[in-house]
Image (tube, rainbow, N blue to C red):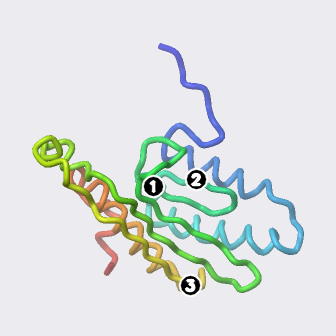
Amino acid sequence: MMDVPPTIHGRNNLESWAKLREFVAAFPDDDYWARWKPMVIGVLDTLESYGLRDVFRAGQSMHDIVFSTADHHGLRDEPRVVLTFYPFQQLVRTTYLRLPQKPAWAIESGKVAQSPHVFMAPLTLERLISPAKGTRAILEYLRMLWVDTKSHTTPLPAAFHSLDV
């Protein structure tokens, strides 16, 4: 059996978080990035403390941080949570994005074949928050992402059980 070569994106959830940390660390230490990097690392540390790196894939799009439940990088129309950091304002724009799509439960159950009009409606939610106080909003969006993409086959991760989200 041949090993899959490593990528800059990571082969699995855990590796994707490690690759994202390498990506963040590679930015220069000028005035902008020296403020941006600790914001990103702080949020990643917090999410990891909840055990979420085991259940979400982490990546980037330019300098936005992206979380998904997909088993691959290069998202097209898969739902995702996107974090955009504004270091001078010390704010994070947290976005939950769900494009119109056929839900996995409908595909797996054969309901799409019975009714080609079964779609999840598009949805975009955004909040502008401070990283220190924004953990709850980020967790709410990650929970929504899980429910929309995995709840039909996999129970809610334990990290969300102790939270009131």
Residue 97: percent from left, percent from top: 44, 65
Q: Residue furthest right?
A: 30
| Residue at position x 54%, y 86% in the image | 133
> Is 96 left or right of 64, judged from the image as shown?
left
Q: Are marks 3 and 2 in contact (CB under 8 Å)?
A: no
Circle 2 sits on which residue? 59
Dot 2: what SS?
Answer: strand
* Separation of residues labelled 3 and 2 (CA atoms): 20 Å
Q: Going from the N terminus, do you reach mark 2 or mark 1 first?
A: 2
Q: Which mark is residue 68?
A: 1
Residue in view at x 54 percent, y 45 percent? 74
Please state which amino acid type lies under the numbered disc 1: Ser
| Residue 124 percent location from the top left of the image | 43, 72
Does 101 sit above or below residue 147? above
The residue at which mark 3 appears reads as: 129
SS label for mark 1: strand
Q: Amino acid at mark 2?
A: Gly
Rendered position, 73 above or below 25: above
Q: Give how far across and how far down residue 111 sits, in percent.
A: 13, 46
Q: Are marks 2 and 1 in contact (CB under 8 Å)?
A: yes
Sequence-wise, the earlier of marks 3 and 2 is 2
**Distance between the Cα atoms at labels 3 and 1?**
20 Å
Mark 3 or mark 1, earlier in chain = 1
Residue 21: horizontal and vertical position, in percent?
67, 55
The residue located at (37%, 69%) in the rendering is 123
Please identify the quadrant where the C terminus is shown: bottom left
- The residue positioned 31% from the left and 74% from the top of the image is 162
CA–CA distance in space, label 2 to label 1: 8 Å
Tell which of 163 and 4 is nearer to you.
Answer: 4
Quadrant in which residue 10 is drawn: top right
124 up-or-down from 25: above or below: below
93 or 100: which is nearer to us?
100
